[in-house]
Image (cartoon, helix red, strand yellow):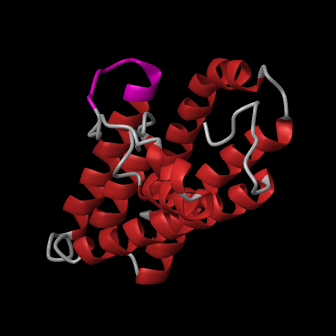
Amino acid sequence: MLFSPGWRAHVRQGEVLAVFSLGLLLGGTLSATVLWLLSGFAAPLPRAVRIGAILVIAVAGVAREAGWIRVPLPQNARQIPREVLQSRIRRGSLQFGFELGTGVRTYVSASAPYVVALGLVLAHQGPLATVLTGTGFGVGRAVTATARYASRHDEWDDRRVTRMPILTNAIGVAVLVVLALLYR
């Protein structure tokens, strides 16, 4: 976690959280920009094929979250090294947030971000919609870190773990519904 109970750094935790959150936003925005560029490859596909593929991917994501199917998600099994945060706390927090915000350097356990990423590539939306979606991914990760910081509660992680399956299933269903509504 970004903060330990025995925090003794010369930089305030709130400041570190702000820099970390900025990194998350920048990383999510960059990833979405890359997805938008890649979506040009899907543009020549017929609309019906793209819509069908999006729906199949969304249904697979929901089924995976519900535990009905097993689909391994792409991941980078390495953790971000501790040295990133230990040498220069502000710069390290920005780098850590950026790498986490891209979703590339760390493991993303939920299906929804992958469903959305593939949906964005296949849908070939405009750059604004795609970039705002990536920024939203960064915001989502920042909200989690902010909620953890604000809770100041040792049991926060335990509660999060027990509620995560409900949340990921709800997100999966919401993504499926939104994608279906967008392509009516």
Q: Is residue 18 above or below residue 165?
A: below
Front residue of 137 and 129: 137
Residue for point 67% across, 44% down: 144
Residue 19 among magenta residues: no
Residue for point 65% across, 54% down: 142
In the rendering, at what x and y percent does residue 179 appear? Answer: 45, 56
Q: Is residue 39 visible?
A: yes
The C terminus lies in quadrant: bottom left
Residue for point 37% across, 18% down: 68
Residue for point 45% across, 36% down: 110
Q: Is residue 124 visible?
A: no
Q: Is residue 120 above or below residue 113?
A: below
Front residue of 101 and 134: 101
In the rendering, at what x and y percent does residue 183 appear? Answer: 42, 63
In the rendering, at what x and y percent does residue 134 appear? Answer: 48, 65
**Magenta stretch bounds:** 64-72
Q: Is residue 125 above or below residue 105?
A: below
In the rendering, at what x and y percent does residue 12 appear? Answer: 79, 55
With 53 as the anchor, is 149 left or right in this view? right
* Image quadrant in which you'd find residue 40: bottom left
